[in-house]
Image: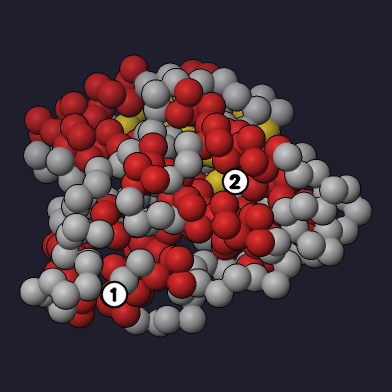
Amino acid sequence: MGNLFSGGRALPLSIVGFIALVGWVARAKIWRKKAVPSQATNLAPEWQDLFHRNYYGRRRLQMIPNSDRQNMLRDFVLISMRDSPNCVNKMRNYLGKREMPKHLYIASESIIDMEAYRAVVTPYYRNGNILEFINRRAVSDGRKLQLIMQIAQGLAYLHSLGTVHGNLYPANILVTDDEDIVLTDAEIYTKVVKLMLLRIRIPQSIVYKSHQELDGQEVPTKNADVFAFASTSYAIITGRAPFSEIANPYQRILKITQNGHRMLPKPLSTSPMLWDLLRECWSAEPTKRPTMSDVVYWLGRATPNRRSLLIDVDEI
């Protein structure tokens, strides 16, 4: 590559990794606060009713105060108005107009106001996120392939509308009570970067991102989503995040700056065809990564019966 990560450049990779780590940590933060029902104020009547009924449509919500589990105000609350009011107003206005596309594999959302905050509300699912789901129960390789395909279809649909997810990783992929996936928080991270010129500090998602995102070369793009999709698929296949064996976050970032995703060991249950596809998605050059439509096409060529993507696929 013609950048700092190429061999023979002036800066050693260790220095580049350190710079990426310091830059990531030093960025201004958006505080992610999780409200419980007792903290929610000024709710519209239909939301007050929602608190008492504990249901939203057909989907159950977690309504246990002080629970460690996700509650209905699942993920994103803006910083208060006293912190950079102009930027916050931009983001509040965006959320106020936000309309998520209706799709089988994209979570429904609503926006509520809570005093100085505006929150994105998503349904609660008892199965948790995709990584929690596959680690709680025996999920066959064939079923994992189906879930990966659902993620690809949901992401491809967003891309067809010109929407960049911006922060795809297992915690933003929930498993419904029917055991299908839904993508959450689509475009929020992208808008934060563009409207507020900030990065959210989310350590859990670092290992799913490309080095271009970590060092600021690449704002959230469709190509970055493709990279994150491959990292997420790897986590689903193996049951753990990439580089989970590395405890030190600095060492993790250093590994990513060394194009480490392409050096990850191939899981035994993964066919050469699927592995080649993931490695293409991890291409160091963003423009050489396939589109999500391409990914859906290649995944669609295989079914559990044809066994062409995962070996030893069990009957579903």
Of discs 1 and 2, which sits in the foreground?
A: 1
Q: Quadrant of residue 82?
A: top left
Residue 49 position in % (x across, y down): 57, 24
Residue 89 position in % (x across, y down): 17, 27
Type of the residue with mark 2:
Leu
Does residue 146 lie above or below 250 as drawn? Answer: above
Number of marks in picture = 2
Which residue is under mark 2? 174
The residue at 40%/64% (across/down) is: 207
173 and 274: which is toward the camera: 274
Query: Which quarter of the rendered picture does the N terminus lie within?
Result: bottom left
The residue at 39%/24% (across/down) is: 162
Mark 1, other Cα within 10 Å: few <14 / some 14–19 / many ≥20 = many
Q: Determine whether, in the image, residue 57 is placed left or right of residue 141.
A: left
Q: Determine whether, in the image, residue 221 is placed left or right of residue 60.
A: left
Which residue is under mark 1? 254
